[in-house]
Image (spheres, grey):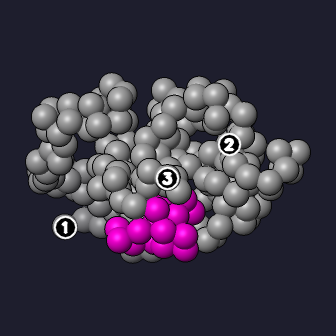
Amino acid sequence: MIINPKLSFFSPLRKLIILLIGVVSLSVVSCGVRQQVIVTPLKYDNQTISRLSRQFGVQLTTTDNLELYSVCSQWIGVKYRYGGNTKNGVDCSGLVNKIYRQVYGLKLERNSANMLRRNCMAINRTTLREGDLLFFRTSGSRQSKTPNHVGLYLKNGRFIHSTTSKGVIVSNMSEAYYVRTWITGGRVKR
């Protein structure tokens, strides 16, 4: 075997050749390795999506946050209880807090005024997206911009909230009462 003196063990050219051989070897080996693709079953079949669409009065598709609607559907009809945050009774901020924790893994402030002040960036009603919060002033001076009621926006003007008279329901923002008591929307800071 004849060794070229220009290719001494530590020469830059030899290092380059070894590096190129290594790269080519890895690319050839990696091309032959097949990655295993794990297919998970669909959690929301067409029947479930149709049921949720009827329940919320909106047309849902696979592009919607179906987990949000599924979690919300479990709360509809729960009675109102001031300070409550269980399915035995829940107030508006308790409801929003529970849904946010379950769907998004976020803990929000416990009352609507602090949610707006500490957890949200105020947004206009024309820019609302699924999961945004809606803030209202339902009692006291209507001039006050401090909310005392909060709901969670779904889509097409629909939102879920807990009312003192009917418990957890889905309402429409275009109803006169909610137009009159509206303060602002809120996008939760993440």
Location of the N terminus (image quadrant): bottom left
Give the spatial CA distance, label 2 vs label 3: 23 Å
Tell me which numbered mark, 1 or 3, is placed earlier along the sequence: 1
Give the residue at mark 1: 1
Q: Which residue is mark 3?
A: 165
Q: Quadrant of residue 14?
A: bottom left
Q: Which residues are magenta?
A: 80-95
Label 1 packing within 10 angstroms: few (<14), some (14-19), many (20+): few
Comes first in the chain, label 2 or label 3? 3
- Can residue 150 be seen from the camera position used here? yes
User: Helix, strand, or loop for circle 3?
Assistant: loop
Position of 39 with respect to 74 (left or right) is left
Q: Residue 39 in magenta?
A: no
Residue 78 percent coordinates (x, y): 36, 59
In this rendered view, identify the residue nearer to me: 79 or 145: 79
**Depth-wise, is mark 1 or mark 2 nearer the camera?**
2
Q: Position of residue 21 (x, y in %)?
A: 29, 56
The nearer-to-camera label among 1 and 3 is 3
- In terms of depth relative to the viewer, which is nearer, 166 or 170? 166
Does the rendering let one see residue 7?
no
Going by the numbered disc 3, the residue's amino acid type is Ser
Q: Is residue 41 left or right of residue 58?
A: left
Q: Which residue is at 35% across, 29% downward?
A: 57
Q: Quadrant of residue 4?
A: bottom left
Spatial CA span between label 1 and label 2: 80 Å
For badge 2, the amino acid type reads Gly
> Circle 2 sits in a helix, a strand or a loop, which is it?
strand
Eyeballing the image, is 46 above or below 85? above
- Residue 185, numbered circle: 2
